[in-house]
Amino acid sequence: MKSLSSVTVKSDEVPSLALMQAALDLSPTGIIIYEAVRNDLEGTPQLAPLQPHSANPIRTLRLVLVNAKTEQTLGLNRSQLLGQTVDAVFPESMNTDLWQTVIEVIATGQPCQRDFFYHIQRTDTAAWYGLTIKPVGDGERAVVSFTDVTELRAARLSLLGDSILFKALSSTVPEMGVVVTDFFKKIITASGVLPGLLLKTNPDELTGEMLENMVLPDFREDWRNYLGTAREGEAHFFSDHWGGWRSEVYIGPVYNDRGAVVMILIVFRNVTEQYRQQQALIQSNAALQQSNQSLEQFAYVASHDLQEPLRKIKSFGDLLRSQYGPAIGTKGADLIGRMQSASDRMSTLIQSLLAYARLSAEQKQQPSMVHLEDLFNDLVSDLSVLIQERQGVVRLKPPMPIIPGDMQQLRQLFQNLLTNALKFVPADRTPIITVSAQIVEGPNVPNLATSADSVYAQVSVQDNGIGIDRANFDKVFGLFNRLHGRQQFEGSGIGLATSKKVVENHKGTISIDSEVDKGTTFNVYLPMEMNQFEER
């Protein structure tokens, strides 16, 4: 049998053969045509054992056509390849099943595709090649095209490893589902808890399917857009719900080591139960807020209505003492004095309770910018009599910031703190009060959820008084909570509760730093930005 290279052709066929060769040389794929050799060739390794039952077995294979890509890959030119048998050109491959595959294609006429790893010793190169083998001509030849698929196989292995990792992750984390697709949106793996109202099959039936086809029609268009932008490198994170299912969803690209998108990762986190609990908490908070508002409204009304009978009690007591003093005697006058003293305390208590209730019951005031230094100077002037009585010293450390807030409420807040600082000092000690302020970043504010870019004014009121035991820090802000007897220190037990309410109205917080008999520092944190205050 003659090889293609030895076939005699007519002169008018030469241009067409040359044209075909030129076209093959332009292909980026290596192309070789092999011809079966059935007669013995002296000194040539026999392939006959591959066809033990054939009457005329193929003894070997001869190269009859190659293209430029083949020459480049093998490191041999065309004259060194054409007419040569495979053992001469590919000695390293004679112990593999590659040639049996080519012979089977020639013998059966059935094409074949496979990957083959080949080390070319003459060029010291090794690679995986994707082979496509097809019969041609009269059943005595086969064409083999080959492409270097080393990187593609590595990518496939990487995808397989990643998909195994994602599958293990989804099976480990409760209420989590993972879907991984290739670049063309074909599902590589799917596992875990997936939303049945979004995906129309269970995870075990998704592998190998196109994700868009597995999404129910009502959601398909949105998901087509999500997947399309993920292929372009854009990630999406959102919450969505399908029927009774609520989920947090991440859809984003997965890159290879060269920065190219090779996969799309979709992660579902079932937050249905958390959402239900959150809604229940919101409803409970709303009910609690309504209850608190009702109680505050009741306190406001009750305090207001108690004023009139209390005034009458005091007026009648004054009348008894002035008009019937001689008749009731010394003992009676003492009883009336005690009654009047109790009425005064009751009046103070009601006024304090009324002021506290008014903080919640009144309409929200339009905030203004309050200069704290001016405010404290005014308060020191207003409290000058008390300061002189106690022989106290109030030190203001400028500068102090300007903050947004309700002027009257802020006055009430800091007046309470200054009054307490003057009051809760041993009688044999001179009260020394220091007021200072500084700017702090939101994340440094204690016991308050703040944004990273927020700023607060920290206003500190420090005294040298009796101090507060750490166990009582929370108690001092409760209504009617008194840590000391009335004989030691007067007061209604509402002042600090009112102060805390003002701070809360301004979306701030208040903390205590104190040690028994060594003084107390109240640290008030208030927003510096108007928009923070207006969110209340």
Image (cartoon, grey):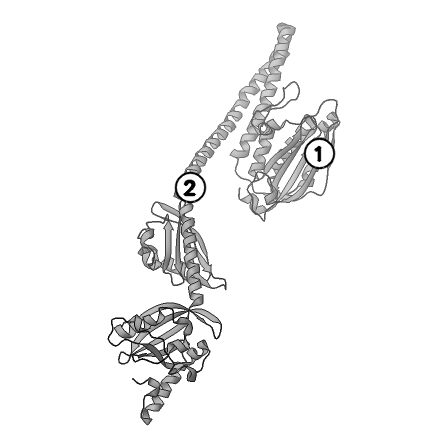
At label 1, the amino acid type is Val
Q: Is residue 268 visible?
A: no
Tell me the crowding category of disc 2: few under 14, some 14 to 19, or many 20 or more residues within 10 angstroms, Cα based: few
Going by the image, does 496 lie left or right of 246?
A: right
Residue topped by disc 2: 274
Q: Which residue is mark 1?
A: 380
Image x and y of residue 284, in percent: 43, 35
Identity, as a three-letter code, of the amino acid under mark 2: Gln
- Residue at position x 42%, y 41% from top? 274
Which residue shows up at 44% across the image and 38% down it?
282
Q: Position of residue 323 (x, y in %)?
A: 62, 11
Q: Nearer the viewer, residue 428 or 384?
A: 428
Q: Within 10 Å of the Cα at label 1, are there few (<14), some (14-19), or many (20+) other Cα atoms?
A: some
- Which x, y percent locates residue 160? 41, 58
Mark 1: which secondary structure?
A: helix
Residue 320 falls left or right of residue 168: right
Residue 333 showing in the rendered view: yes
Task: Provide the secondary structure element on which disc 2 rests.
Answer: helix
The answer to whether residue 39 is above or below residue 464 is below
